[in-house]
Amino acid sequence: MHDLSPRAERLKVPAPSSASRGLGRLTLDMRQDLAPWKQALFVGSSLLAGVAISVAILALAGIAPLTLASELAGVMTAENLRGVLIQAAPLILVGLGASLAFRIGFWNLGIEGQMVFGGIFAAAVSIYDIGPPSTRLLLMGCAAALGGALWVLLVMLLKMRFRVNEIIATLLLNYVATYFLFHLLYGAWQDSKTAFPQSSPFRPFERLSDIGLGLNSGLLIALGAVLVVAWLVHLSRIGFYTRFISANPRMAGIVGVPVRALSIWIVAASGACCGLAGFVNVASQEGRLTQSFANSYVFSAVLIAFLSRNDPIVVAVVGFLIAVLFITGQTLQVFYQIPFTMVQMIEAIIVMAVASSEFLIRHRIRWTR
């Protein structure tokens, strides 16, 4: 047995041992299947974590948790519940719009632009006195749905014809829609009596009226849309096709699913829901076309879609809870000087928390030694 040279000794690699492996490492595996109750547990835990972080931020801003709890309880009183339900109607509609698009993997972040064009189309029916008074609201609602659908279909055209990413296109077209709204309100549609950048007030037969018990007819529109979308998703063949397209669009096309046509119709329905949300805002809360009737709805729509996991029935429940958050935020603004951007930040925290739960549902993290 010959001795090893110094060079060979330097090149010798010691055999691996348990002591040389250190503390171990993290490995990431794809989950094949996860029970529904475990999925709900992940989502619920992430949501509670997001709420806890939000409560801590508000506590640092000077609002004690007990004070926050009392304000939330105050929102649910009879006199405040009407405002919550009015706010819930457009939130439910934008949540439906986002969830429909997300079902086929289309990231519709142009919620505000579609609301803007929904409001513009509805206001045009009023301003140009289209149709008899008895059917004016119906015409305004149909025009609003058409406006939202056409605006989002422009993005679908860009994606299919030129392969433009829909996230970028929808976000940038929000600005185009907003500045077109400004062009109208500072120009031809400006209220001649007040000279403010807003349209003339709608007439009484062009307003969504109260139907008693603190309910506005805008909420009936939202709940009607929930029922239609729920039937579409859970009971029709289209709902099965959307799941197929979301899982594997290429395979869906191979087996005969009309992927292109169905995607266009689903995206159009998404825009129509957002256009109806714009109509509900201008015909109930505002009573006219204003500059800000569609502001700050993108985060809310994404949050509602994520929390509901794109289920239209759950969208109605989550939309109501987000409306409670909005009204509570307005109360905190008035009495505690909390900026509304903090309310939006809380929404963003909850969105990130729920998005992290989606990662944990799809992946398993293990510690290996």
Image: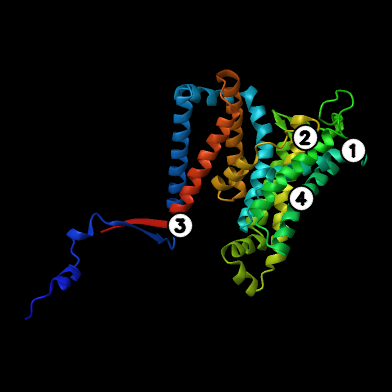
In the displayed structure image, the side of residue 270 where residue 21 appears, left or right:
left
Q: Secondary structure at mark 3?
A: helix
What residue is shown with label 3? 362
The disc labelled 2 sits on which kind of residue? Answer: Val
Reading the chain from its start, which is encountered first: label 1 or label 3?
1
Q: Residues within 10 Å of mark 4 (few under 14, many from 20)?
A: many
Reading the chain from its start, which is encountered first: label 3 or label 4?
4
CA distance separating discs 2 and 4:
18 Å
Reading the chain from its start, which is encountered first: label 4 or label 1?
1
In the displayed structure image, the side of residue 290 where residue 46 appears, left or right:
left
Residue 134: numbered disc: 1
Where is the C terminus found, in terms of image quarters?
Answer: bottom left
The disc labelled 3 sits on which kind of residue? Answer: Arg
Residue 151: numbered disc: 4
Residue nearer the viewer, 291 or 9: 9
Residue 282: numbered disc: 2
Task: Identify which residue is drawn at 57% across, 18% down.
Answer: 335
Marks 1, 2: nearer the viewer: 2
Q: Secondary structure at mark 1?
A: helix
Q: Residues within 10 Å of mark 2 (few under 14, many from 20)?
A: many
The disc labelled 1 sits on which kind of residue? Answer: Ser
Residue nearer the viewer, 99 or 178: 178
